[in-house]
Amino acid sequence: MRKQRKWLPWSVTPLRVLFVLLLLAGSASADLSTEEILKKADEARGNLKGVQWEVSVVSKEKERTTEMVFFVQARGFDVLATSLFPAKDKGNKILLVSGNMWFHKPGLSKPVPISQRQKLVGMASYGDIASTNYAADYEAIHQRDENVADEPCHVYDLKGRSNKVTYDRITYWVSRERLVGVKAEYYTVSGKMLKKASMEYDQFVEVDGERRPFISRIEIQDVLMTADSTTLEFDKTVLREIPDHVYNLNLLAR
């Protein structure tokens, strides 16, 4: 007599084995602290040992379009941005060192201190073209997890540690798998939303032997004038050593 084959209530199949392995693997951020996750996200926004790129800033306000182009050299927290376009602004420089920012243009006797919060063009502030240092500049609290365009993200409430930061408060969505910021809302200290932004990462750089996504586009929207927007396009990104003299304030006018 043929014996009947006994089936377990949850029989083992290749598909179920794969499912279990995926559960065990978790996301890339599973074993990282909030600070470590934000550091990874900062790296994708230019906070590296040495990196340069070009950024094109296009502002659309009502029926007016304005474009600016900068060559940016970043090393950790320090950034030098040199204007390439329009012609009338060519050679203008913005220097950010240890949270302090200066502006210089040909003809000025010495650099002028400015704030990262000051308007550059459209919805973009001077601080928006620099690399981010959210891990050090902000106190971060994990609020929740939720999806952005079907991508699982951690949501953080960031509060500025000083008045030198570009924004007092940020709600920041960071991809759990890619460890990059994909969405942000920017607020005043009183809690009023100023603007919101989405980020894309179509460039890649090699960081410590790992191929990492790098910022390629930021679109900033006015929350009141919804038709107004400012887009930052990042390209020509290259990792390289940048010498100390690039960030020497005394040499900025030369």
Image: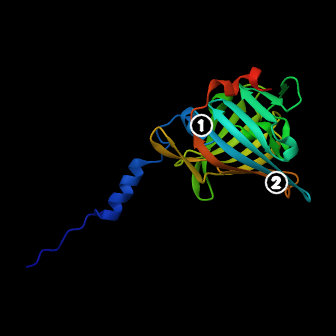
Describe the element under mark 2 as helix, strand or loop: strand
- Specify the amino acid type for callout 1: Leu
Quadrant in which the N terminus appears: bottom left
Dot 1 alpha-carbon crowd within 10 angstroms: few under 14, some 14 to 19, many 20 or more: many
In the displayed image of the protein, which residue is found farthest to the bottom?
A: 1
Residue located at (36% from left, 59% from top): 18
Q: Nearer the viewer, mark 2 or mark 1?
A: 2
Q: Residue beneath label 1, please?
A: 38
Above or below: residue 101 compared with residue 177 = above
Residue located at (58% from left, 38% from top): 43
Residue located at (86% from left, 32% from top): 106
Q: Is residue 111 left or right of residue 202?
A: right
- The foreground one among 96 and 35 is 96
Above or below: residue 101 compared with residue 155 = above
Q: Is residue 92 left or right of residue 62?
A: left
Describe the element under mark 1 as helix, strand or loop: helix
For the image shown, how many numbered marks are present on the structure? Answer: 2
